[in-house]
Image: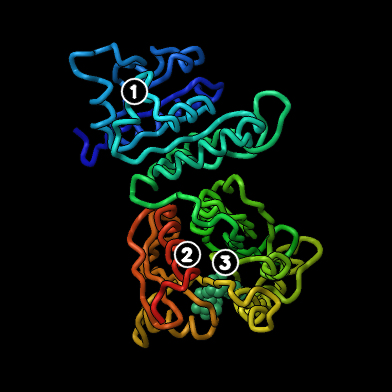
Amino acid sequence: MVENQKKIVVGVTGGIAAYKACHIVRAFKEAGDDVTVVPTEMALRFVGKATFEALSGNPVSTTVFDAVDEVQHVAVGKQADLIVVAPATADFMARVAAGRADDLLTATILVATCPVVFAPAMHTEMWLNPATQANVHILRSRNIVVLEPDHGRLTGADIGPGRMLEPNHIVELARTVYDGESLQPTLVGKTLLVTAGGTREPIDPVRYIGNRSSGRQGLAIADIAVQRGATVFVVAGHTESDIPSGATVVRVESAREMRDEVERLSGGADIIVMAAAVADFRPEHVAESKLKKGTHTDALSTIHLVENPDVLRSVVDKRELRELSEHAIIVGFAAETGDDVGTVLDYARAKLAKKGCDLLMCNDVSGGKVFGQANNRGFLLARNGAIINIADGSKHVVAAQILDVIEALNQADLPD
Ligand code: CTP
């Protein structure tokens, strides 16, 4: 048995997105997990039992009348560490909300004590129907995670919320839930503005000064916030990660463009998280045509730089001028290394004071830690001096922890 192997149940219900469940089964299997697929009868009209058996390496049944001697309808749910149902149709969610147990999947869910995640997939009208929304509300109140579906093209002509999230995205969010983080709708009614990625400061039409930021941490914060029900705007520089569905994304190149977009969007924000790696300097002159070696050697070998605006500081100043909500919570990021003069914490304290934000998320990046890595960790430094540890985890797990602290601040629960 693989170390830390989880027992995962992938439930599949009867919608056209059922074929995508195959990718979910595969992703969990590739991570070394033990996967049991429990489809409904309707799901098997879309994808055959043999496909799920081959991909999972485990037998597949839909009914409580198979393997009766093993009391399968109780055993599967009791042994599971995580249950993911994708796609979850409107009809299936109605059955679970009503407490039904008329097939193996609903019976499994009714006995389960592990985390349960549903990835809905249906037409927009069905998703928005008050009956479905009431069922979603009931399911969430019972601690089942009902993921916010994607907006996008559905089967047929309609466009709107209801499309199932992409398989890898579902797996990432389900793992975040398994790791103990909440995706319950605690940010409904809140607007969050996040900056992510690295800025690129042009030298000429083909060259720029950039940095190594992948943008993954900022985008993970946006993603978790969308799932917690916030209205999310992302001002994104260069990123190497999927843009979260459900967020409004504005692309920028340079620090000055980022500043302009942040100023435009910050007015209505309750939470502002500046996770972008903003270039501190930019070339003073940007050549209109490509600089050529030989002809422009001087211009290329000596690029004169001027300082960029500090986007974070400008937002803090705007709050002081009451140009944005005085209750807006502003969070900065700092990647620091300790040296002979000071520790990471010393530098973090100085940066928080200089920037004037409410929280500073600090990473120790000595020796190249964090950049480009799948995991992250660090600590949040609050204005009152409190240090809140952010435990090692995926960027989604770290994002959830950061949002937990912001939400606690929002509710004025943090000590002064
Ligand atoms: N930041 C910003 N605008 C800048 C530089 C930084 O908004 N021109 C923000 C970053 O998004 C981050 C925080 O400020 O949230 C800290 O970034 P960092 O680069 O560490 O700050 P600097 O002031 O540039 O400090 P240092 O001299 O250590 O680079």
User: In this picture, is 287 found above or below 157?
Assistant: below
Work out whether mark 3 precedes mark 2 in sequence or the reverse, and give the earlier one: 3
Identify the residue position indicated by label 2 in the image.
407
Q: Which mark is residue 271?
A: 3
Q: Is residue 258 visible?
A: no
Of 30 and 398, the residue lying toward us: 398
Query: Residue 342 appears at what percent x and percent y?
Result: 36, 85
Is residue 190 or residue 330 the one in the foreground? 190
Q: Earlier in the sequence, mark 1 or mark 3?
A: 1
Of discs 1 and 3, which sits in the foreground?
3
| C-alpha span from label 1 to label 3 | 42 Å
Q: Nearer the viewer, mark 3 or mark 2?
A: 2
Q: Residues within 10 Å of mark 3 (few under 14, many from 20)?
A: many
Q: Report which quarter residue 250 is drawn in.
A: bottom right
Residue 56 disc label: 1
Q: Which one is in front, 261 or 209?
A: 261
C-alpha distance separating marks 3 and 2 = 9 Å
Display colour scheme? rainbow
Disc 3 is placed on an element classified as strand
Q: Hey, what amino acid is under mark 2?
A: Glu
Left or right, 337 with respect to 136, comes to: left
